[in-house]
Amino acid sequence: MRKLFGTDGIRAVAGETPLDKRTVFAVGVALARTLGAGASVVMGMDTRESGPWIAATLAAGLRKGGATVENAGILTTPAIAFLARKHGFSAGVVISASHNPWQDNGIKIFGGDGYKLPDEVELGIEAEIERALSTQSQGSGVGVEDALPEVNESFRAEYVQFLLDAVPGISLDNRKVVIDCANGAASSVAPQLFESLHGTVEVTHASPNGRNINENCGALHPEIVAAEVKLRGASMGFTFDGDADRALFADERGSVVNGDAVMLACARDLHARGELAGDLVVATTMSNMGLEAAFKRSGIAMLRAPVGDKYVLEEMRRSGASLGGEQSGHILFPAKATTGDGLLTALLVLDVVHRSGKTLGELIADLKNFPQIILNVKVREKKPLDSLPTVVEKISAAEEELRDSGRVVIRYSGTEALARVMIEAESEEAMRRHAEAIAGAIRAEIGV
């Protein structure tokens, strides 16, 4: 069982284990040893104030282990995956905690092929980290703030060109759009990218100060960009998370458009052009039953994978699907990129709107979601849910009542100390009643 890696790398409060300097240095050493002799790594980060010292410490550890390091500076997670693959680096590393608050940070690792590492490789790195920690001195990783190389500014321009080349002829058609950069990594790319597309671009939350990333903005708060679209009379809005590997949208009416709706619009477009492999889309256990029904009406099948874009991609590769994603806005287009990319998704959605002659709202008008609630419960430990008698009892009661008219999904977050209680049901009263009952049982058993 993995101890350090969650569903999206290593993540914690910056400065605390496992993101203390000694452990971060050991991660660098371990990764270099795992990659082998002559390894090269490209590294980028989001806008958190802890990013530079974590990156410098990790770079020092990588060098200690025998690897060379190039620095892409503040850049999105998918940009690092792209650069790792394009330039033949042994790995790409991103210092980011994605949608988490500024106090947190993380280490995400991509292989030289641009894909996130399989679980078994992460387990091997964990074992190497333990070996590195057992042999290094107590002060390792301290005082290495100057170890990060100069930023290679050409990397950003390469990534912007890649995005433009991925969607030839893309244009805003003189529309007005609002872009919310979450005061994160998109701030370094999105304004330049969208301002070249022949329209009016109004950029918000693109002034990072190290502590305002995701704060009342971005994909965690899509209602913010939705309100701006309505206020400014725009045609559409895009909003990204801290490292811009996912995107959510607002339509012309100022309504939030989540990842389920984006998958529906894109799947129908691919299907109409004969480019939806197997007439199949891979979603997750969190995607709404209404999405499944809408796909069925369009002759499209839907598979469900565990939550986490790496698991969606694994299922896509098994099934041969050409589109997949998460309700949260991670959308995967494997013909275009190796990982979820919020900026690429925004361009592709724009392209669908452009070619259809319809608005985004019109493209998804028939998507009728079942009432859904997600409750997050802070937990002190992640015990197996089936070992908690009261929780099992409440889940069983919900499943029995909602057997033919809803779904119950209870899981631990892979990136935070949270249990997530998701219930969908035709009856909103039953949905809320069972969600509160299960959340209360979890709180009583293992809550903070």
Image (cartoon, rainbow, N blue to C red):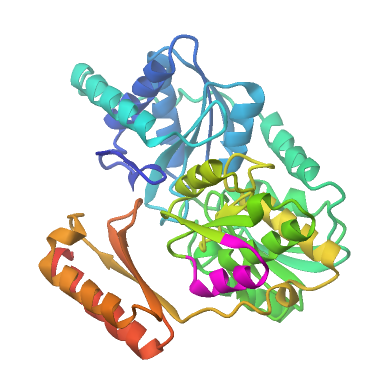
Magenta segment, principal secondary structure? helix
Q: Nearer the viewer, residue 406 or 233?
A: 406
- Image quadrant where one finds the C terminus: bottom left
Tell me the quarter of the image containing the N terminus.
top left
From the viewer's perspective, is residue 283 above or below residue 231?
above
Q: Which residues are magenta?
A: 287-301
Q: Going by the image, does 393 lie left or right of 353?
A: left
Residue at 13% in and 64% down? 388
Residue under the image location 73 percent in, 36 percent down: 157
Residue 428 percent location from the top left of the image: 40, 87
Question: Measured from the top left, where is residue 387 in percent x and y?
Answer: 13, 59
- The residue nearer to you, when weighing 154 against 161, is 161
Rendered view: 293 above or below 385? below
Is there any visible trace of residue 46 in the rendered image?
no
Return the residue nearer the eye: 170 or 422.
422
- Give me the residue at 55% from left, 69% from top: 292
Q: Which percent across, then down, holds residue 145?
A: 42, 28
- Residue 349 is left or right of residue 69, and the answer is right
Magenta residue check for 300: yes
